[in-house]
Amino acid sequence: MTKLKISAGKFIFEAKLEKELAPMTCDAFEKSMPFIGQLVHVRWSGEGVWIPLGDMDFGVEYENHTSHPAPGQVILYPGGISETEILIAYGGVDFSSKMGQLAGNHFITLQTGLENLMSLGNTVLWEGAQDVRFDYHT
């Protein structure tokens, strides 16, 4: 199992890559690590924060995809109808864009720090974009 450390704003989460469920997505993501971006609050999907990635191409198709990630699940939308993005669910999410329902590949699951998810979401909502970094956990 590959462990990750996710630094999001002032919060730290430990997570695991879901290599058995989403092997192609995990492999593609690992090639871009450490992964650095900014979290902004979702516009259409509910209680989630996302990293907009424009036309970035991870070269993956749908695998282990969902429109309703649970709190602590991280999904990658590979692009197509809307722009490529990574979303972290902190509460109820119905993954959508202005074009309608979307599905993303569930490829990371947070394992520690879940008690801070709502605080992270509220910080992004009320204080604005927060830096995020995905590293291997040592």
Image: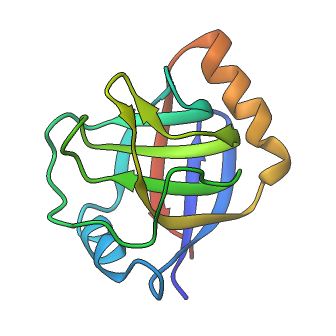
Q: Position of residue 74 (x, y in %)?
A: 53, 55
Q: Which quadrant of the view contains residue 123?
A: top right
Q: Quadrant of the C terminus?
A: bottom right
104 shown above or below 132: below
Q: Position of residue 18 (x, y in %)?
A: 51, 77
39 shown above or below 3: above
Left or right of 54 in this view: 69: right
In the depicted view, which residue is nearer to us: 137 or 27? Answer: 27
Is residue 109 among the parts visible in the rendering? yes
Q: Residue at x 61, y 57 (%)?
A: 73
Q: Residue at x 21, y 67 (%)?
A: 60
Is residue 38 among the parts visible in the rendering? no
98 shown above or below 84: above
Q: Quadrant of the N terminus?
A: bottom right
In the depicted view, which residue is nearer to us: 30 or 65? Answer: 65
Numbered circles on residues, count? 0
Q: Which quadrant of the view contains residue 61?
A: bottom left
Q: Residue at x 18, y 44 (%)?
A: 80
Q: Position of residue 59 (x, y in %)?
A: 14, 64
Q: Residue furthest right?
A: 115
Q: Position of residue 82 (x, y in %)?
A: 25, 35
